[in-house]
Amino acid sequence: MKKFICISVFIFFTCNEDDNTIMPVLASAYFPLQVGNTWTFLATSDSSKWIYEITDTKDFNEHVYFERVLTFSDGTKDTEYFRITENDVVLLNYDGKDYIYIDFEKPLEIEWNSYGNYYGFIKERNLSVQVAAGNFNKVTEVYFSNRNVSDIFQFNRYAPGVGLVESIRFRFGLKLINARVNGIDYP
C-alpha cells in the first residue's frame, strides 16, 4: 500500500534592501478574496465609515470572480469584481473585460496599465503601518493614478494575511479600524 503525503507551501516575497530583488509572492496573501471577508475603514476627512465586503462569486467569461461591495456611510454601494490569475496578478473585470488591478510581483515603480487612463505601480515594500485594527509589517504600498486627471490618485497599503489596511487619497484617507479576513478578526 502506497502512502501519499500532501505538503502545502505558502510563498511570500522577500526583498533584498540593496537591489530590491523580489521573490514570488502569493497575491492572495495581500489581496485575500474569500466570501465573508469584511474590512471597515474610518475616513480621515469626516470620520465616516466605509465597509468593503466580499459578498459572492460570479462567473464571467469562464472565470470565477469575487464580488467586492463597498458600502459608503450614507448606504450607497459600489460593486467590483476581482480574480487572481495563475500568474499571481489581481485582475479587475470592468465592462466585461479583464484589466490588471495589482501586480504584486512587479519591481518597484514599474508601471502597469489598467482600464481607461488608469495605471499603477509598486511604490514601496516592507513598510510598517499602525492603524486601529493593529500594527502590520511587511506592508506593500501600491500607487494608483489616472493619466488625465492629476488629483485622482491613491497610495494603498496592503498587509499580508489582511489586505488593504490604509489608503491615502487626494484630500482624505482611509484607515482600517476592524476586519474579518479568512476567519480571523482584527483587532
Image (spheres, grey):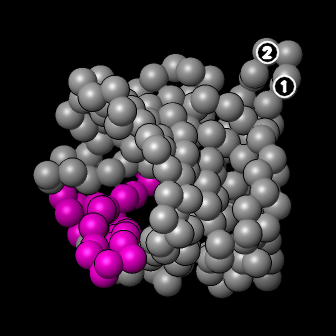
- In terms of depth relative to the viewer, which is nearer, 42 or 79? 42
Of residues 61 and 7, the one nearer the viewer is: 61
Q: At label 1, which amino acid type do we have?
A: Asn
In the image, taking residue 63 as reference, residue 156 lies left or right, namely right
Q: Are marks 1 and 2 in contact (CB under 8 Å)?
A: yes
Q: In this view of the protein, can residue 122 be seen by the observer?
A: yes
* Disc 2 target residue: 19
For disc 1, the neighbor class at 10 Å (few under 14, some 14 to 19, many from 20) is: few
Residue placed at 46% from the left, 44% from the top? 171
* Picture mark count: 2
- Residues in magenta, as a range: 59-88
Three-letter residue code for mark 2: Asp
Mark 1: secondary structure: loop
The residue that mark 1 highlights is 16
Residue 170 picture location, percent across and down: 44, 41
Q: Against 93, is 46 above or below?
A: below
Label 2: state its secondary structure. Answer: loop
* Residue under the point 61% across and 54% down: 166
Q: In which quarter of the image is residue 107?
A: top right
